[in-house]
Image (cartoon, grey):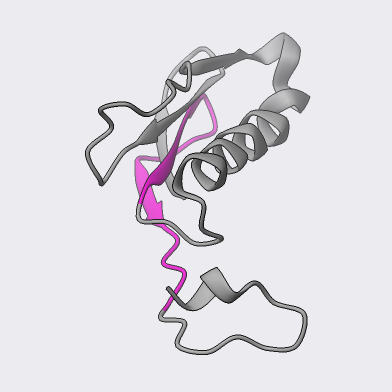
Protein backbone atom coordinates (compact mmCIF):
# COMPACT_ATOMS: atom_id res chain seq x y z
CA UNK A 1 0.00 0.00 0.00
CA UNK A 2 1.21 3.49 -0.83
CA UNK A 3 -0.44 6.19 1.26
CA UNK A 4 -0.20 9.80 0.14
CA UNK A 5 -1.58 12.64 2.24
CA UNK A 6 -2.04 16.22 1.08
CA UNK A 7 -3.50 19.35 2.58
CA UNK A 8 -6.86 20.38 1.13
CA UNK A 9 -9.82 22.34 2.43
CA UNK A 10 -12.12 19.49 1.39
CA UNK A 11 -11.79 15.94 2.80
CA UNK A 12 -11.61 13.13 0.18
CA UNK A 13 -9.75 9.93 -0.64
CA UNK A 14 -8.92 8.15 -3.90
CA UNK A 15 -8.10 4.43 -4.08
CA UNK A 16 -6.59 2.91 -7.21
CA UNK A 17 -4.23 0.14 -8.34
CA UNK A 18 -0.81 0.92 -9.82
CA UNK A 19 0.13 -2.15 -11.87
CA UNK A 20 3.83 -3.07 -11.74
CA UNK A 21 3.46 -5.85 -14.28
CA UNK A 22 1.90 -5.35 -17.71
CA UNK A 23 -1.83 -4.77 -17.09
CA UNK A 24 -2.84 -5.83 -20.62
CA UNK A 25 -5.53 -8.46 -20.38
CA UNK A 26 -6.09 -7.79 -16.69
CA UNK A 27 -9.58 -7.03 -15.50
CA UNK A 28 -9.85 -3.32 -14.76
CA UNK A 29 -10.28 -1.99 -11.22
CA UNK A 30 -12.24 1.24 -11.29
CA UNK A 31 -10.60 4.06 -9.34
CA UNK A 32 -12.76 4.90 -6.31
CA UNK A 33 -13.20 8.33 -4.80
CA UNK A 34 -14.55 8.58 -1.27
CA UNK A 35 -16.07 11.84 -0.08
CA UNK A 36 -16.42 12.98 3.54
CA UNK A 37 -20.07 11.86 3.82
CA UNK A 38 -19.05 8.25 3.04
CA UNK A 39 -15.69 8.24 4.87
CA UNK A 40 -16.28 4.89 6.63
CA UNK A 41 -16.12 3.09 3.25
CA UNK A 42 -12.36 3.73 2.79
CA UNK A 43 -11.37 0.39 4.34
CA UNK A 44 -13.84 -1.47 2.12
CA UNK A 45 -12.40 0.22 -1.00
CA UNK A 46 -8.82 -0.67 0.03
CA UNK A 47 -9.86 -4.26 0.74
CA UNK A 48 -11.57 -4.47 -2.68
CA UNK A 49 -8.38 -3.30 -4.41
CA UNK A 50 -6.22 -5.81 -2.49
CA UNK A 51 -8.66 -8.63 -3.25
CA UNK A 52 -8.66 -7.66 -6.94
CA UNK A 53 -4.84 -7.81 -7.11
CA UNK A 54 -4.79 -11.25 -5.44
CA UNK A 55 -7.51 -12.50 -7.80
CA UNK A 56 -5.69 -11.29 -10.94
CA UNK A 57 -2.16 -12.33 -9.86
CA UNK A 58 -3.14 -15.64 -8.26
CA UNK A 59 -0.64 -14.95 -5.46
CA UNK A 60 -0.97 -13.87 -1.83
CA UNK A 61 1.76 -11.23 -2.30
CA UNK A 62 2.04 -9.26 -5.55
CA UNK A 63 4.22 -6.45 -6.92
CA UNK A 64 1.20 -4.29 -7.76
CA UNK A 65 0.40 -1.35 -5.49
CA UNK A 66 -2.81 -0.14 -3.89
CA UNK A 67 -2.49 3.65 -3.93
CA UNK A 68 -4.47 5.60 -1.33
CA UNK A 69 -4.50 9.38 -1.75
CA UNK A 70 -6.07 11.20 1.21
CA UNK A 71 -6.73 14.93 1.18
CA UNK A 72 -8.07 17.04 3.98
CA UNK A 73 -7.65 20.07 6.24
CA UNK A 74 -5.75 18.04 8.87
CA UNK A 75 -3.35 16.35 6.44
CA UNK A 76 0.29 17.25 6.02
CA UNK A 77 2.13 16.45 2.79
CA UNK A 78 3.38 12.91 3.42
CA UNK A 79 3.97 9.67 1.48
CA UNK A 80 4.27 6.27 3.21
CA UNK A 81 4.98 2.99 1.43
CA UNK A 82 4.33 -0.33 3.14
CA UNK A 83 6.98 -2.81 2.03
CA UNK A 84 5.86 -6.38 2.74
CA UNK A 85 9.42 -7.65 3.08
CA UNK A 86 11.02 -10.73 1.64
CA UNK A 87 9.21 -14.01 2.17
CA UNK A 88 11.34 -17.10 1.55
CA UNK A 89 9.42 -19.80 3.36
CA UNK A 90 5.87 -20.49 4.40
CA UNK A 91 4.63 -21.46 7.80
CA UNK A 92 2.00 -23.92 8.89
CA UNK A 93 -1.38 -23.17 7.25
CA UNK A 94 0.10 -20.50 4.94
CA UNK A 95 -0.36 -20.57 1.16
CA UNK A 96 2.45 -22.08 -0.90
CA UNK A 97 2.28 -19.05 -3.25
CA UNK A 98 3.34 -16.71 -0.42
CA UNK A 99 7.06 -17.38 -1.02
CA UNK A 100 6.85 -17.10 -4.84
User: Is 66 located above or below residue 6 in the figure?
Assistant: below
- Compared across the picture, whether 93 is left or right of 78 comes to right
User: Is 91 located above or below residue 93 in the figure?
Assistant: below
User: In the depicted view, which residue is nearer to us: 47 or 37?
Assistant: 47
- Compared across the picture, whether 13 is left or right of 43 comes to left
Q: Residue 70: x percent and y percent? A: 49, 30
**Magenta part of the protein: which range?**
64-85
Q: Residue 60: x percent and y percent? A: 56, 60
Q: Is residue 44 magenta?
A: no
Residue under the point 52% across and 24% down: 73
Q: Residue 22: x percent and y percent? A: 22, 38
Q: Residue 30: x percent and y percent? A: 48, 16
Residue under the point 54% across and 47% down: 54
User: Is 32 located above or below residue 81 in the figure?
Assistant: above
| Residue 3, image quadrant | top left
Residue under the point 67% across and 14% down: 36
| Residue 82, image quadrant | bottom left
| Residue 40, image quadrant | top right
Amino acid sequence: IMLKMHYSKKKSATIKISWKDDPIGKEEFAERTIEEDNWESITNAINAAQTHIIKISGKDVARDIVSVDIRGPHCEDLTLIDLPGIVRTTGKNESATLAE
